[in-house]
Amino acid sequence: MKRINFDPYLPIVGVVGLIVLWYVAVWCRVVDPILLPSPTDTFAALYKGMDGGRLGFDFWRTVERTTLATLIAAVIAIPLGIVLGSSERLYRSLEFVIDFFRSTPASAMFPLFLVLFGVGDATKISVAAFGAALVILFNVAYGVMNARKTRLLAARVMGASRLRVLTDVMLLESLPATFVGLRNGVSLALVIIVVAEMFIGSTDGLGHRVFEAQQLFRMADMYAAIFAAGALGYGLNLLFLLIERKFVHWSGK
């Protein structure tokens, strides 16, 4: 099969095209200039905010919350996913509950977590961890259930115990699906954290920065915070993708 080589600079074309369209929209006044500042003003606000400004502090507060929520989700969901995936009957008996809560919008869970944890970081982190954990659990369980039967049979024929098969074969076989779950989970955790920072009594974070700038009609600052959130999401997803390529090099083989 012929290998397809991708030019690493191709994604820049889309970025440049977006900025050009943005300049054209501003120049043609497609939108009121007050509501859509130029890319120059927006990126100037982004640089100023990240270089010792308030935006930099808010950025790291969101990173802290998202990282903590993802870690909590991973610590809970990965072992549980392996256990559930190793017994398909057990997973099928809980499948409706898992899918039900996985399909429930996380924002609908805010009132419940507010009652349980009150207004503060605990609510933001716990609801993000809850949403991310369900995504990770789903992927890990299916990764274990879809482990290659030949490798499982080979391990059992060679006399490996059930625990050894679980840790040495199923765990490794499920790693590609686990990383898919982690990438989706961290993205979902970031979305939930940013939304929670907007509406659940926050005094910092990117969500708070977007909401405050919009309320004060500082549109360049608002777009700067939005771009910072987008860059954070892209960076976290890329980080997990690079880790996966380095440590799960056997994926698909």
Image: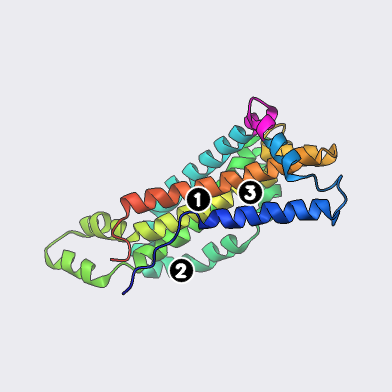
- Looking at the picture, tell me which residue is in the foreground, 148 or 38: 38
Image vertical order of residue 210 relative to residue 238, above or below: above
Residue drawn at 64 percent across, 39 percent down: 117
Magenta stretch holds residue 221: no
- The quarter of the image holding the N terminus is bottom left
Is residue 131 visible to the viewer in this orientation of the structure?
Answer: no
Residue drawn at 32 percent across, 54 percent down: 248
User: Tag 2, which secondary structure?
Assistant: helix
Q: Amino acid at mark 2?
A: Ser
Q: Amino acid at mark 3?
A: Ile
Q: Nearer the viewer, mark 3 or mark 2?
A: 3
Marks 2 and 1 sit apart, C-alpha to C-alpha, by: 32 Å
Q: Which residue is mark 2?
A: 93
Q: Amino acid at mark 1?
A: Asn
Tell me where residue 113 appears, x and y as whole percent.
65, 45
Image vertical order of residue 107 relative to residue 152, above or below: above
- What numbered label is drawn on residue 192? 3
Q: Which residue is mark 1?
A: 237
Q: Is residue 213 left or right of residue 8?
A: right
Please, what is the dominant secondary structure of the magenta stretch?
helix
Residue drawn at 39 percent across, 63 percent down: 5
The residue stretch that appears in magenta = 47-58
- Looking at the picture, tell me which residue is in the foreground, 250 or 130: 250
Label located before the other in sequence (1 or 3)? 3
